[in-house]
Image (spheres, helix red, strand yellow):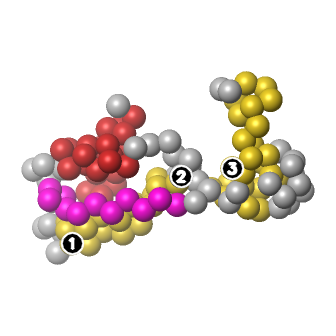
Amino acid sequence: MHELWVANALLEAVLEKGKGLKKIEEVHVSVGCLAMVNLEQIEFGFKMLSKGTPAEDAKIFLKPAEAKLRCSEGHETNEMIECLDFSHLLPIIRCRICGGVAQIIEGKEILLTKIVGE
């Protein structure tokens, strides 16, 4: 059901940005690889929810985006080592360069990048 909420929020954003358009033909979305969503379910939910709106029948392009991590030493990378030292529910992400604890700085977002319409 998480994906249906995402699809609904996406549709609301599309309709807001597309105010004044009679028909929305394309929707482009960047989905971070750590967003933990199923792209097919988002597409299905969007198509179902958009019926009767200017976005009905719009082609939706969901593009996966890489994660970006930064460790306490300042290294930035998109590669990670996930260590389950503490708990599988609270993974510690380590820098592949130095082994230090890393924080996610990009990769959890879902961003509407472009809409095309008339």
Is 62 situated left or right of 71 in this image?
Answer: left
What is the quadrant of residue 60 in the picture? bottom left
Disc 3 + disc 1, Cβ < 8 Å: no
The amino acid sitting under disc 2 is Cys
Q: Nearer the viewer, mark 3 or mark 1?
A: 3
Q: CA distance from mark 2 to mark 1?
A: 28 Å
**Image point 36% across, 69% down: which residue?**
114
**Image point 80% across, 52% down: which residue?**
95
Sequence order check, earlier mark of 2 and 1: 2
What mark, if any, has residue 117 been given in the picture? 1
Sequence order check, earlier mark of 3 and 2: 2
The amino acid sitting under disc 3 is Ile
**Image point 34% across, 54% down: which residue?**
13
Residue 3 sits above or below residue 75 on the image = above
Q: CA distance from mark 3 to mark 2?
A: 11 Å
**Residue where numbered disc 2 is placed:** 33
